[in-house]
Amino acid sequence: MKITVHLDLEEVDYIAIVQAANYKRISTEDFIRQAIRKAIEDTMNEMRPTPTQSFQSQTPESEERDREVKIRKKEEK
């Protein structure tokens, strides 16, 4: 699927995009596409919780339930 996007850029930003695209020897459209993909990838990676974040986001109830499960597993052994 293709969509058309209108970018409202300051002239200095547009010039920077053109210069960067020329440096990479690609079209400005391809440069912008790559920049958008990279920004999405970076954002998605930021959104993934780390093991520490997952643990910290637990509620007191879920922590208690986890402790109970661990105790039961020890008792079963």
Image (cartoon, rainbow, N blue to C red):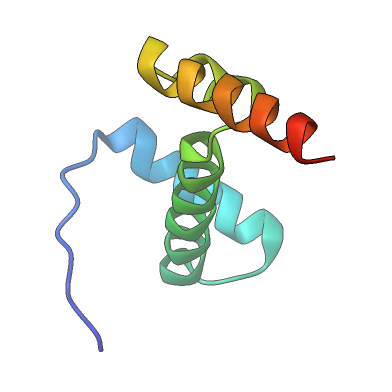
Q: Is residue 26 above or below residue 7?
A: below
Name the image quarter holding residue 62. Answer: top left
User: Position of 6 compared to 60: left or right?
Assistant: left
Q: Is residue 9 above or below residue 18?
A: above
28 left or right of 72? left
Furthest residue to the top? 60
In the picture, measured across the screen, residue 36 lies left or right of residue 70, that is: left
Q: Where, by quadrant of the figure, is residue 5 drawn?
A: bottom left
The tally of labels here is 0
Name the image quarter holding the N terminus.
bottom left
Q: Residue furthest right?
A: 77
**27 in relation to 7, above or below:** below
Image coordinates for residue 52, horizontal then vertical, percent: 64, 20
Q: Is residue 22 left or right of residue 4?
A: right
3 or 66: nearer the viewer: 66
Quadrant where the C terminus is found in the figure:
top right
Look at 76% across and 40% down and name the residue there: 76
Front-most of residues 57 and 7: 57
Identify which residue is drawn at 68% across, 24% down.
71
Residue at 56% of width from left, 48% of height from top? 19
Which of the two residues, 50 or 68, is positioned nearer the viewer here? 68
At x 23%, y 40%, the residue is 9
Spot occupied by residue 44 in the image (x, y as percentages of width and height): 48, 47
Outermost residue on the bottom side: it is 1
Q: Is residue 3 above or below residue 7?
A: below
Q: Position of residue 66 (x, y in %)?
A: 55, 26
Q: Quadrant of residue 2?
A: bottom left
Q: Residue 24: x percent and y percent?
A: 69, 60
